[in-house]
Amino acid sequence: MAAPAPRSAPSAFGHAALLLALASALAVIGAALVIFLVARAESLTAAAALLDGVVFANGVVATLVATSPFLATLLVGYAYMQRGLKKRAARRAEGAGSLRG
């Protein structure tokens, strides 16, 4: 199986931006779905009231809940960045090795 052709910097940036937008959209849809279902489900009213009391009683918890999709996308982006840096270092080492030999 042949390795995929390396992407140019603008192409890689566009791909990363597309993945970020997709992950953010999925997080927003998921959060909206959970909020909608909790608000509409009578069987979850007590659990929702408890969750509401815990989340909004502490500002730090509310902030973490609100920013969790953003933090998750940053974590994924960091992993992609590390992978790219390792590939670049390997290419650089491979190129330097061929110049010496």
Image (cartoon, rainbow, N blue to C red):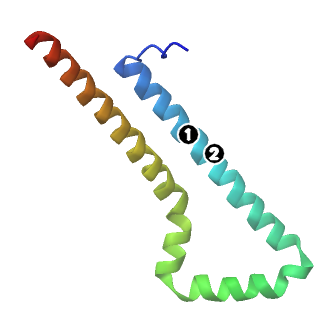
Q: Position of residue 83 (x, y in %)?
A: 37, 37
Report the Cα–Cα distance between label 2 and label 1: 6 Å
**Image position of 56 (left or right of 31):** left
Name the residue beneath numbered marker 2: 25
Q: Position of residue 24 (x, y in %)?
A: 58, 47
Q: Position of residue 39 (x, y in %)?
A: 82, 72
The amino acid beneath tag 1 is Ala
Instruction: Name the quadrant of the C terminus.
Output: top left
Quadrant for the N terminus in the image: top right
Image-based side of 38 in relation to 81, left or right = right
Query: Looking at this view, is 39 or 47 the one in front?
Result: 47
- Amino acid type, mark 2: Ala
What's the residue at 75%, 86% (across, down)?
A: 49
Nearest to the observer: residue 31 or residue 83:
83
Q: Which residue is mark 1?
A: 21
Looking at the rendered structure, which numbered label has been put on residue 72? none
User: Residue at the spot x=34%, y=41% of the render?
Assistant: 82
Q: Do the CB atoms of the residues marked 2 and 1 lie less than 8 Å apart?
A: yes
- In this view, 66 is above or below 4: below
Mark 2 lies on a secondary structure that is helix
Q: Residue at x 60, y 82 (%)?
A: 55
Residue lying furthest left: 100
